[in-house]
């Protein structure tokens, strides 16, 4: 081996080795992270990656998911050309076609649906990716359809709605100054390592933690001063019982309540029904722990709590449960106060970058005025009132029932039918469409149902705008050519808007023009300038996150106060929703005997992100099989041990997975990750087991039975 060979093998960059380091970002998880990546490129291929030193998100580190980027972008099932379906839906037979032919077919079919059934019969859907969403939404509006919708029908929005209802806008924790952190369904060790690092740092500095989780987790082990372990989805009752103790002991801030809080008296009366004689029965948490939680809150006056994008809201009572937790902040005078919760100003894709962005103007200014209401509006009126976009959990029903109007075509970027409860119903609904286009990096099993599959490129192959906390922003550049004929999502939308000659000149100018005019012009910076930088650069002074004046200035709620009782809901009795954060059991009793276990699915695991990296060999090797956690006592009763096959069944069907006996879950709880094609836990769920306030699915509470596979 020559010296040069050795250097190449060691992947040492330089002119002699032909290896160059280029900078990009990891797009596998949320916009709140998007860590910096050094991509080592040789002959146009990524041969190695590492975290970028000095990057504001990760400063050289990468997590288990981030490290999988090279295997992810080169996954075997990458789609490389537009594909036209030649066999039955779902079978996976396609032939390559040109982009020109693909655009012709899309234009013909979408326009035909519009002419025959109205523009609203065409749905524009986005899966988990978020970077192109404003354009997709504006595209839908330019086409004339109100039906833009996305994965956020099941993620984050319910918590956002709870904040909007109570405080008029989203609230975030001022954890820097808190004495106590209410980590309610909080385990950043698996879902956001940066959050975990920060929590550990604050722990060392003396911050106290009250952790409330259905399972034992690293957070309950490493952070908790007090750990409460309620049954899945009983959080609302638990929060009310804590509130009841606080109120009875006078451990509340009455002057604050009288001045700034609406609905306290009725709320106080309501929570008095959750007490020492019933709380253990409802939640499984002994009353002395409830009392201890109230005492901890009393002893540590400055308290904040986490947002909960998923677990708290993934129940049919999730919106109300989260409101019940938020109420603890209001009655202790911890909203809009130092060390409590404060309003976090709007920022690009909820990234707390510290500066204002006007993408909402871009996405809403062309919203069709006389269009019909979007899918889900009738069934989820509060969602419609607060969000005004499609509640995608009602999509399969509307496709199949054609009420209140027919849906004939879906144009999607990253449609994963297995995201939906009763995923089989969604797959079936897709077969009923006249036309379905899916755009994805991979030929997923949902893409197999499409008439046309468009190849999207990855974050390594495109450029995109990214803000980061601290007034920072970046515009990445491609570090490699797109694989095959794949294109970025925004290039596809721009080309298609022009091909279809949609009546929207701004849309037709494309993504970069949008970013320039609606975001960067306000800070006098050009996209070209940001692209030159190898790391995010400071473009704006950060406005202080909290001035603790929101309450005095009046909140954006109808009463201007923090609403324990929602005036919006109160004023709409026809919705049939409760204005107080009332508690409803997460499950019906009807099938308790046949289905004695509770199935909770989706608690994050370090090596997976939804459906994305189950097929990436390195990540898969860390947990080769879909595996359910069950309590050791339950396992003994079923006579199963580590790695045995179990069958999990519900009224909807059954799946076979491996079992992992553990003490992290209590008896009668079965915990399983989602997104596996071969053991799709969402196929077991009822499509109508939804929260009437938010429309969110109850991924974390479904009755099931478990048997040993013979
Ligand atoms: N049982 C259960 N189900 C859940 C959850 C749970 O906790 N339990 N969690 C819910 C939550 S919180 C969320 S956020 C959702 C996740 O929502 P999903 O939309 O299911 O997320 P993914 O599977 O990550 O991505 C969807 C598709 O986008 C494709 N994709 C990736 N990058 C791009 C890109 O740049 N462009 C395009 N066009 N496509 C791309 C992926 O290949 C994938 O096929 O799942 C929900 N489902
Ligand atoms: N590794 C990894 N990281 C991710 C993701 C991923 O798929 N993989 N997904 C990203 C996305 S889209 C999202 S939305 C976030 C979600 O981020 P998190 O909210 O942190 O997600 P989870 O791990 O599902 O839930 C946190 C804890 O809530 C507990 N929990 C579940 N149900 C209940 C309940 O009913 N009551 C209480 N009190 N606790 C409960 C779980 O046991 C878990 O320990 O994670 C993001 N980060
Ligand atoms: Mo999510």
Image (cartoon, rainbow, N blue to C red):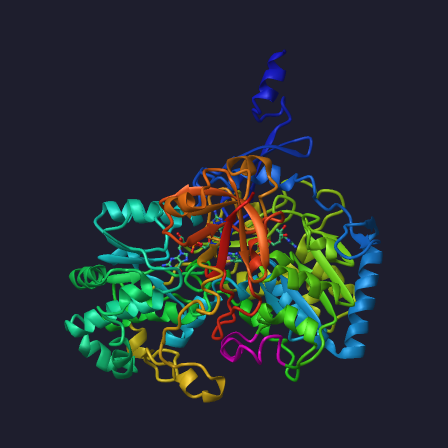
Total residue callouts: 0
Where does the C terminus fall, quadrant-wise? top right
Q: Position of residue 626 (x, y in %)?
A: 54, 44
Q: Position of residue 463 (x, y in %)?
A: 62, 50
Horizontally, is 201 left or right of 315 in the view?
A: left
- In the picture as drawn, the residue positioned furthest to the top comes out as 1
Horizontally, is 678 left or right of 303 in the view?
A: right
Q: Position of residue 366 (x, y in %)?
A: 63, 75
Location of residue 367 with respect to 689 vertically, above or below: below
Between 534 and 698, the one lying in front of the other is 698
Location of residue 655 with respect to 300 vertically, above or below: above
Q: Image quarter for residue 431?
A: bottom right
Image point 35% across, 68% down: which residue? Answer: 236
Between 589 and 460, the one lying in front of the other is 589
Between 86 and 74, the one lying in front of the other is 86
Between 76 and 544, the one lying in front of the other is 76
Write down the region rendered in magenta. Answer: 373-388
Image point 42% across, 54% down: which residue? Answer: 669
Task: Report whether residue 611 is seen.
Answer: no
Q: Position of residue 142 (x, y in %)?
A: 69, 73
Q: Image quarter for residue 471?
A: bottom left
Task: Report whether residue 534 is seen.
Answer: yes
Location of residue 518 with respect to 654 vertically, above or below: below
On whether residue 220 falls in the magenta region, the answer is: no
Where does the N terminus fall, quadrant-wise? top right
Horizontally, is 489 left or right of 614 in the view?
A: right
Image point 71% across, 58% down: which residue? Answer: 438
């Amino acid at each position: 081996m020559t010296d040069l060979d050795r250097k190449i093998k060691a992947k040492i960059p330089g002119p002699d080795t032909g290896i160059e380091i280029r900078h990009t970002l990891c797009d596998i998880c949320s916009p709140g992270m998007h860590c910096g990546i050094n991509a080592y490129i040789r002959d146009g291929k990524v041969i190695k990656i590492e975290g970028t030193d000095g990057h504001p998100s990760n400063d050289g580190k990468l997590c288990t998911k981030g490290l999988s980027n090279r295997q992810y972008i080169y996954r075997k099932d990458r789609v490389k050309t537009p594909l036209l379906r030649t066999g039955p839906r779902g079978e996976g037979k396609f032939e390559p076609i040109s982009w020109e032919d693909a655009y012709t077919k899309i234009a013909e079919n979408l326009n035909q649906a519009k002419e025959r059934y109205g523009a609203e019969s065409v749905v524009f859907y986005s899966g988990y990716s978020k970077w192109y969403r404003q354009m997709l939404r504006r595209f839908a509006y330019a086409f004339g359809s109100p039906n833009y919708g996305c994965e956020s029908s099941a993620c984050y929005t319910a918590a956002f709605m709870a904040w909007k209802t109570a405080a008029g806008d989203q609230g975030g924790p001022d954890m820097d100054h808190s004495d106590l952190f209410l980590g309610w369904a909080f385990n950043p060790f698996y879902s956001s390592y940066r959050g975990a690092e920060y929590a550990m740092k604050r722990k060392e500095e003396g911050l106290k933690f009250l952790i409330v989780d259905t399972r034992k987790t690293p957070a309950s082990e490493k952070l908790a001063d007090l750990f409460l372990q309620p049954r899945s989805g009983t959080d609302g009752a638990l929060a009310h019982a804590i509130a009841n103790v606080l109120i009875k002991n006078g451990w509340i801030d009455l002057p604050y309540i009288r001045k700034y809080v609406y609905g306290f008296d009725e709320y106080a009366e309501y929570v008095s029904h959750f007490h020492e004689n019933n709380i253990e029965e409802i939640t499984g948490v002994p009353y002395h722990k409830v009392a201890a939680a109230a005492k901890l809150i009393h002893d540590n006056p400055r308290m904040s709590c986490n947002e909960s994008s998923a677990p708290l809201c993934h129940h049919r009572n999730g919106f109300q449960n989260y409101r019940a937790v938020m109420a603890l902040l209001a009655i202790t005078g911890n909203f809009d106060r130092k060390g409590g919760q404060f309003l976090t100003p709007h920022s690009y894709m909820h990234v707390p970058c510290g500066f204002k962005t006007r993408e909402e103007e871009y996405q809403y200014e062309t919203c069709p005025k006389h269009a019909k209401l979007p899918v889900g509006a009738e069934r989820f009126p509060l969602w419609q009132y607060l969000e005004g976009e499609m509640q995608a959990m009602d999509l399969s029903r509307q496709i199949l029932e054609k009420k209140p109007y027919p849906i004939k075509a879906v144009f999607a970027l990253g449609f994963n039918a297995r995201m939906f409860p009763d995923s089989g119903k969604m797959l079936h609904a897709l077969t009923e469409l006249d036309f379905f286009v899916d755009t994805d990096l991979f030929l997923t099993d949902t893409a197999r149902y499409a008439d046309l599959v468009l190849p999207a490129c990855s974050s390594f192959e495109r450029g995109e705008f990214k803000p980061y906390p601290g007034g920072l922003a970046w515009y990445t550049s491609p570090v490699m050519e797109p694989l095959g004929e794949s294109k970025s999502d925004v290039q596809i939308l721009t080309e298609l808007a022009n091909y279809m000659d949609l009546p929207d000149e701004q849309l037709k100018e494309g993504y970069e023009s949008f970013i320039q005019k609606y975001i960067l012009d306000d800070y006098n910076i050009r996209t070209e300038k940001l692209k030159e930088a190898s790391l995010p650069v400071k473009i704006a002074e950060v406005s202080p996150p909290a001035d603790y004046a929101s309450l005095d200035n009046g909140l954006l709620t109808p009463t201007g106060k923090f609403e324990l009782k929602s005036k919006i809901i109160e004023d709409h009795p026809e919705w049939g929703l409760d204005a107080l954060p009332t508690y409803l059991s997460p499950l019906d009793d009807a099938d308790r005997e046949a289905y004695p276990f509770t199935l909770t699915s989706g608690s994050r695991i370090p090596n997976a992100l939804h459906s994305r990296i189950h097929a990436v060999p390195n990540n898969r090797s860390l947990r080769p099989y879909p595996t359910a956690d069950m309590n050791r006592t339950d396992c003994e009763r079923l006579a199963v041990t580590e790695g045995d096959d179990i069958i999990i069944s519900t009224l909807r069907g059954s799946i076979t997975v491996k079992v992992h006996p553990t003490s992290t879950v209590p008896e009668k709880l079965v915990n399983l990750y989602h997104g596996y094609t071969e053991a799709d836990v969402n196929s077991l769920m009822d499509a109508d087991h939804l929260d009437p306030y938010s429309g969110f699915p109850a991924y974390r509470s479904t009755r099931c039975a478990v048997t040993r596979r013979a």
